[in-house]
Image (spheres, grey):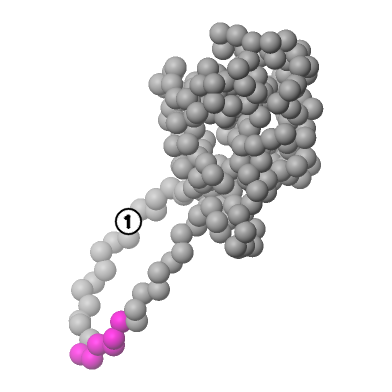
């Protein structure tokens, strides 16, 4: 991939930005295209949108180090323009390979370009936050984090979609409407003999290690940062 010349973006790039994350990541985030910072560093989502993405990943109960992050195209378009259909097509076999190698259970599309691969012709404003099953993979469409940086009104929508993703991944039930408060109970007489209170057992938090990865292992998964 690093020497790819399958489209003209190869002429203007500083570095190819393949993607990064554990080879066995259960969740893969797919953005749009590298920007200026990514082009310089060769890593995805390292600018302002990346900072916000990390915060969002936290809202889903995950950490950046545990998920795989890449883009629909691997080289920066000039002036950060939208990717062209021919560029997306030329780059698609790289993304195919990444999905085949990582085998994520859940793919989160960030923005309309990666969304269109699984939901052609759909509108992001209609389907964001609605997971769909594609074979073995759940695909979860979301607005691009940069959209919230440009339109403040979208920030809460994106945050809520990310929280809902967390519930989907960790199996936490959707919050229910609070029931009306019960009437106050009649005062109770204190018991004459009190029993010792059993020490409380700390409950383990539902986190990445327990829910997003398989059996615990002492070996660190290999980081795939490609090819
Ligand atoms: N950085 C990326 O790597 N991808 C985007 O889509 C935006 C910023």
110, above or below 187, in the image: above
Measuring from the top left, give residue 97's x and y in whole percent.
77, 35
- The local secondary structure at tag 1 comes to loop
Image vertical order of residue 51 relative to residue 65, above or below: above
Q: Quadrant of residue 13?
A: top right
CB of residue at label 1: within 8 Å of ligand 1? no
Q: Nearer the viewer, residue 192 or 154?
A: 154
Picture quadrant of residue 142: top right
Is residue 191 in view from this perspective? yes
Badge 1: residue crowd in 10 Å (few <14, some 14–19, many ≥20): few
Q: Position of residue 122 (x, y in %)?
A: 68, 22
**Residue highlighted by disc 1:** 181
| Front residue (pair 179, 21) | 21
- Position of 83 relative to 220 (above/below): above
In the rendered view of the protein, which quadrant contains the N terminus? top right
Q: Residue at x 56, y 46 (%)?
A: 66
- Per the rendered image, the range of residues in magenta is 192-197
Q: Position of residue 180 (x, y in %)?
A: 35, 53
Identify the residue shown where x is 46% and y is 42%: 59
Kindly identify the residue that appears in the image at 74 percent across and 38 percent down: 99
- Most frequent secondary structure within the magenta stretch: loop
Write the residue at 73% across / 44% down: 103
Confirm whether residue 123 shows in the render: no
Toward the bottom, the furthest residue is: 193
Please check the rendered image and state whether residue 179 is part of the magenta-colored stretch, yes or no.
no
Number of numbered markers = 1
Location of the C terminus by quadrant is: top right
């Amino acid at each position: 991939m690093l020497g790819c010349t399958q489209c003209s973006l190869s002429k203007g790039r500083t570095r190819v930005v393949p993607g990064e994350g554990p080879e066995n990541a259960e969740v893969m985030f797919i953005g749009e295209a590298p920007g200026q910072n990514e082009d310089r560093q060769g890593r995805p989502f390292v600018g302002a949108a990346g900072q916000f993405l990390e915060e969002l990943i936290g809202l889903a109960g995950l950490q950046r180090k545990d998920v795989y992050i890449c883009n629909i195209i691997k080289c920066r378009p000039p002036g950060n323009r939208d990717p062209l259909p021919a560029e997306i097509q030329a780059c698609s076999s790289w993304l195919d390979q990444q999905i085949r190698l990582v085998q994520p259970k859940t793919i989160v599309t960030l923005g309309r370009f990666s969304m269109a691969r699984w939901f052609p012709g759909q509108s992001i404003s209609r389907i964001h936050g609605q997971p769909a099953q594609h074979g073995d993979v759940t695909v979860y469409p979301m607005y691009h984090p940069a959209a919230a940086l440009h339109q403040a009104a979208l920030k809460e929508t994106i945050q809520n979609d990310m929280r809902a993703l967390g519930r989907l991944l960790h199996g936490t039930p959707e919050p229910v409407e609070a029931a009306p408060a019960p009437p106050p109970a009649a005062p109770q007489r204190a018991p004459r003999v009190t029993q010792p209170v059993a020490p409380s057992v700390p409950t383990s938090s539902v986190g990445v290690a327990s829910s997003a990865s398989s059996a615990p292992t002492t070996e660190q998964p290999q980081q795939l940062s490609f090819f």
